[in-house]
Image (cartoon, rainbow, N blue to C red):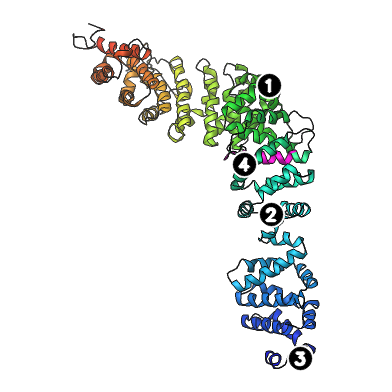
Amino acid sequence: MQDLMRENSINKDWISIGGLTDIIICILGTSHNKDEKRKILVTLKDLVKGHVRNKEKLVDYGGWDHVIPCLGRDPSISKAAVELLYELLQERSGWNVSACRKLSQQGSAILFLVTLLKGQVRESAVYAEKILNKLVEIDEENISWAAKSGWYKPLIDRIVQGTDSSRISMVRALVNMELFDSDLKLLGEEGILPSLLQMLSSGNLESKELSLSALVKLSDCAANKELIAAAGGLPLVITLMFSAHMRSMIIVKCSEILEKFSCDDDGIKFFIDENGAQLELEPIVSDLLALQQIAHSSQNVRRPALRTLLGICKFDAGLVKTAVLTAKGVSLVLPLLDDTDSEIREIAINLLFLFSHHEPQGVVEYLLKPKRLEALVGFLENDDKSDVQMAAAGLLANLPKSEVSVTTKLIDLDGLNALIKIIRTGTMEAKENALSALFRFTDPANPETQRIVVEQGAYPLFVNLLTTGSVMAKARAAALIGDLSRSSPKLVVVSKATGCWCFRPTRPHLCPAHGGICSVKTTFCLIEATALPVLVKLLQGEVHVIAHEAIQTLSTLVQEGSPNRGANVLHEADAIKPVLDIFTWGTDSLKEEALGLLEKVFLSREMVEHYGPSARLILVGMPGRNGHEDSRMGRRVAKVLSLLERYSRSSTSLLPGIFG
């Protein structure tokens, strides 16, 4: 066939009349031989070049249904196919618009052409770009198809430079597309954001709504958020959102944008004007809260508005205070705990956790109303939402512990059990808040409530957290053990000898610290709970907040009436040396705690004889001691040194100026 065409161009007619064209097109559709396909495509190109009727026949009778799939084949095949396709779209005066429109109707054609445009074969890319440019020129809908296939240049050009109607059409297409992060980033880098912001500031309501919808989509990309913020986009969005009588859909989109700009990773860093200056956030917080009061505000507005409020408040404690005291945030958010929308309820509990740092009493009054505490316990039991558990436990921890009725009701409603379950299976952040909430149940003034805590299996969890918990969890677990240990002396049973008078009486095992029969469940004894060695180890970690609680808890073992027992227990556990070491690394407040424990320990002559020399050396040499003897620290140092002096074997005073 190629020889015939080279011999005489009129043979192109005879080849077509003889049916050879139909035969090789059929072979093209069924053959799996790459070389065969390529040769057919090359032959077809020669057959239609400069021959109108052959082109029309190939186009009109579906011949390119077999040609178009070849665009996605092997590079050699796709190159021959795109060259043939280009030839089919040409006529004497240029492009054959009718043929181009027919090609547009082939669903996969644009996708294949975009793939070739981005491919490695330069010649194929050139032909593909020429065809694509013509297709998007004759039909704007093809711009959308090209963008969906990954070629955004025509769409970006129309948004940046097109007419108002074209821009609106393209933005609408953009809003309806499924875009990945790389696509979003590319669109921002190619400069469509200023055009969208221009539509936002000067367009009609339809233009504003479309622009906002596009900005919502583009704000999923962090790089775009930075560009929008730098261009002054946030003030525009905020102004629109809180404008009077604004269309509800525009308010919805504005609130969604603000939500994306205030997510956990970003906080308030994007809340700036075009000059990079921080926006005034107090009125924004007040407006977001006020939005919750508007009767016709839909959940689609309130949800993102609440999330925005939460995101802002998480990063600025001062704004939390503003929200609570100035904007009456607690009274506005508390009713949301009863909202029909579960997401709104969950966001509300997170906000109330933050607010309860500043106005716990208002929260208490609300929770004591019927069915309120049940809802709070429901949040504690929500294993699927760790942030909700964390917030509910934190809210409970911030409520005044003097509210005994709250404590009692929580026990009745299984709230205590829910907190203990969080300590067993929750996230570490939730565990920290749950531990804080448990302090209302471990008050030494109420040993019966303490007993309920222990009976529900909390004690081993506290001991385990001394090893496995975060810094804050270790400190709080140590403090809770200290609360329980303070009750041990009151609960211990003093043993009496039993047995017949003619036999040696049997004596049960007595607790070395409390002098009676101890157990975890009956006396809350930390020795029986095997917490002592772990607490001593915590002192050696040189973490101030942990050491502070560990010392206070260890101090509960040394009772004023019988200090020898407890002091000897600490000695046997190697606890005294780490306490003395604190004076080389601890803060002043931690040193004071250490001095408080030493005041108890050195009531024992044996402990003075054992540790006196090293303790004297440390305390006498403390920096600034002589200049601060009238301070609380100085007085405590002097008291410990006086105890050491009292039991000193030397008759010579060791403290010149104080004892001699």
Q: Nearer the viewer, mark 4 or mark 1?
A: 4
Q: Which residue is mark 3?
A: 10
Amino acid type at circle 3 is: Ile
Residue range in magenta is 251-268
Element marked by disc 4: helix
Residue at (38% x, 27% y) in the render: 532
Front one among 145 and 24: 145
Q: Which residue is mark 4?
A: 229
* Quarter of image, res 603: top left
CA gap, disc 1 to disc 2? 45 Å
Q: Position of residue 311 (x, y in %)?
A: 61, 35
CA gap, disc 4 to disc 3? 67 Å
Element marked by disc 3: loop
Tell which circle, 4 or 3, labels the residue nearer the N-terminal end. Answer: 3
Q: Which residue is mark 1?
A: 366
Q: Are marks 3 and 1 in contact (CB under 8 Å)?
A: no
Name the residue at the left extreme.
651
Quadrant position of the N terminus in the picture: bottom right
Q: Counting other residues with Cα less than 10 Å from the Cα at mark 4, is it few (<14), some (14-19), or many (20 or more)?
A: many
Element marked by disc 2: loop
Determine which of the numbered discs, if any, sits on residue 178 in the image: 2
Q: Nearer the viewer, mark 1 or mark 2?
A: 2
Amino acid type at circle 4 is: Ala
Front one among 316 and 573: 316
Q: Position of residue 301 (x, y in %)?
A: 73, 37
Q: Counting other residues with Cα less than 10 Å from the Cα at mark 2, is it few (<14), some (14-19), or many (20 or more)?
A: few
Element marked by disc 1: helix
Amino acid type at circle 2 is: Glu
Front one among 41 and 239: 239
Tell which circle, 3 or 1, labels the residue nearer the N-terminal end. Answer: 3
